[in-house]
Image (tube, rainbow, N blue to C red):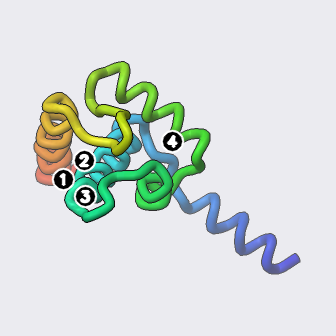
Amino acid sequence: MRMMRMVGQDLQRRERRHKLQIYHDILSAIREEAMTEDGAKPTRIQHLANMSYDKLSRYLDELEAKQMINKANILSLTEHGHEFLREYLKIKELIERMGLE
């Protein structure tokens, strides 16, 4: 019983990620893994982005529809994906500087 209570408390403390944060996590993972010898593969992206495979699949479809990634044999970022990451970082830095986080 005590273990269940601790798990419940941990879940309550963990904040849910917004869709833009999830996009950022996935795109960052793809960018990072694209530099490796094996390239960006969905299972590795799933682990780095900390999400279930079915959710990752849905988000990959969304990102492809928004022309932010290519889902050929190996995942890769498009120029829109790179631009999203640059702009996301600028916004995050602004929010932190203003003390709004």
* Residue 32 marker: 3
Q: Within 10 angstroms of label 2, few (less than 14), some, or many (20 or more) residues?
A: few
Name the N-terminal-most of marks 4 and 1.
4
Circles 1 and 2, Cβ within 8 Å, touching? The answer is: yes
Q: Which mark is residue 96?
A: 1
Give the left or right position of residue 15, taking residue 83 as reference: right
Name the amino acid, label 4: Leu
- How far separated are the C-alphas under marks 2 and 3? 28 Å
Q: Amino acid at mark 2?
A: Leu
Q: Quote the CA–CA distance across marks 1 and 2.
A: 6 Å
Q: Kindly identify the residue that appears in the image at 30 percent across and 44 percent down.
A: 27
Q: Residue at x 36, y 26 (%)?
A: 64
What crowding class fits label 3: few (fewer than 14 Cα within 10 Å), some (14-19), or many (20 or more)?
some
Mark 3 residue element? helix
Q: Nearer the viewer, mark 2 or mark 3?
A: 3
| Secondary element at tag 1 | helix
Q: Earlier in the sequence, mark 4 or mark 2?
A: 4
Q: Is residue 74 left or right of residue 16?
A: left
Q: Residue furthest right?
A: 1
In this figure, which residue is indicated by the disc labeled 2?
A: 100
Precedes in sequence: disc 2 or disc 3? 3
**Element marked by disc 4:** helix
Q: Tell me the quadrant of the picture where the N terminus can be found.
A: bottom right
Give the Cα distance between marks 4 and 1.
28 Å
Distance from Cα at disc 4 to Cα at disc 2: 29 Å
Residue wearing tag 4: 56
Mark nearest the camera among 1 and 2 is: 1
Whether label 3 touches label 1, CB < 8 Å: no
Q: Earlier in the sequence, mark 3 or mark 4?
A: 3
